[in-house]
Amino acid sequence: MAFKDTLGGRALIGNLWRNNPVFRQVLGICSTLAVTNLLKNTLLMCGGLIFATALSNLTISLLRAYIPKQVRMMVQVLIIAAYVIIVDIFIRAHWPEIHKTIGPYIGLIITNCIIMGRAEAFASKNPAWPSFLDGIGAGIGYSLVLVAIAIVREALGFGTLMGIALPARDIWWYQWTIMVMPPGAFFMLALVAWFGNTYVLKNESKGAAK
Amino acid sequence: MILAMTEPIAQSGPGFFTNLLIIFLAAAFTENILLTRFLGMCSFLAISRQMKTSVGLGFAVVFVTTFTAAINWLLHTYVMVPLGIQFLEYIVFIVVIAAFVQLVEMVIERYSPALYFSLGIFLPLITVNCAILGVSLFMLNKQNFGFWESLVFGFGSGIGWLLAIVLMAGIREQIKEDKIPPGLRGSGITLIVTGIIALAFVAFSGMIK
């Protein structure tokens, strides 16, 4: 059986594109959207998010038989919070400068709807290894969208990528102040949602035609 | 994040109540939790379809942010800092919020079953509404907040969220019948309108220094 036909493989790949949570429902953008005006911050946040989603999925899946139904949300949140604390301490130790600007947003990974959503929809019902892959898939699928937004925002707003000036910036580049400000993020995300929805609608009508 | 919580703010400069008013206005307008910090987007996008549920959820959020900010400030200042366990703040905050939401849920269920049913799944989801946890975390970032400042900050942030969702619900009810490109329907157009509202709120930014 090829990797992409296993339960875990399907979960991993499906989350990247077809079931991409941001495209389909614009879920879980809260905390991370705020840091998309600089690519480096976005990559850090996304790294933290992938780590937290994958490992909390794994843990919740391993413990799923022992968690009572009534308190499972609470237990899930606590597990996620524990991993986010690890991310927070790690970033604080290695990138103290960035931590100063995005600090509170790292804590907010806990309340990111995607992590809770995957924990509830997948990890609480499936074995450990597929859950782990599902977490990685959801994290990466989500990161792809945010990195795309960050690239556009940083290029138009600051004329740089990862803090490095774009080539021949003086000649052609003109600052789009709105891209640095919060409304820019809303407009970019709207474009992404438009693109995603159009793609999905097209596929659905194609499926109906068959 | 160095969390040196000092004693309640030194009262030089603006008077005590003026200061609180400034904190309130800043939290509600210039630093609107939804429009400038992107917090609480999930429930915002899903619930703002209807005016009635928006108002209900908005007030629930105001209530919860106000009290959780105050409780979390007390816990942080008098328990976590003396014991040196600030690294546990995420877990403590989220537990406080979850317990408090449970309480609100029971109260609403008892006194307004109609609202309870229309809010449906989103009431328990306030627990994972980033706006609530966000208020507590941003509160700690403001070094010199005392108890009353935190309470007012939580209240102002909640009001800001309420404002944003009610504005949005009003607009969405109006544009429901309009011809919108199919791909933009739902979240797409909502985000564009949110962007425009956010632009309008940027105009407040010079108001408070």
Image: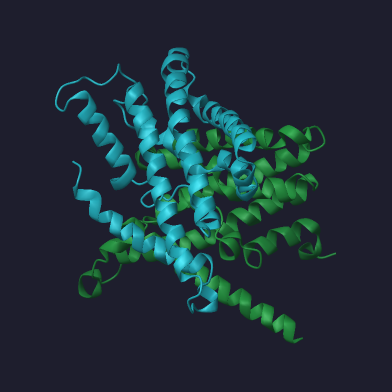
Chain colours: A green, B cyan
Q: Residue A84 at x, y = what percent?
A: 55, 37
Quadrant showing the C terminus of chain A: bottom right
Instruction: State the residue in front, B194 or A180.
Output: B194
Please name the residue shown 73% across and 87% down the image: A209
Q: Quadrant of residue B157?
A: top left
Side of B45 relative to B137 (left or right): right
Tell me if I can see residue A46 in this picture: yes
Instruction: State the residue in front, A37 or A43.
Output: A37
Q: Residue B31 at x, y = what percent?
A: 32, 45
Vertical order, B57 against B7 (above or below): below
Instruction: State the residue in front, B186 or A135.
Output: B186
Quadrant showing the N terminus of chain A: bottom right
List the single residue furthest toward the right. Answer: A1
Give the tally of numbered discs: 0
Please name the residue shown 31% across and 18% down the image: B6
Vertical order, A74 against B46 (above or below): above
Vertical order, B88 against B179 (above or below): above
Tell me if I can see residue A189 in this picture: no
Please name the residue shown 76% across and 51% down the image: A130
List the single residue furthest toward the left. Answer: B13
Q: Quadrant of residue B135?
A: top left
Q: Residue B58 at x, y = what percent?
A: 47, 45
Q: Residue B159 at x, y = what percent?
A: 39, 42
Q: Quadrant of residue B195?
A: bottom left
Vertical order, A21 against B69 (above or below): below
Side of B64 relative to A117 (left or right): left
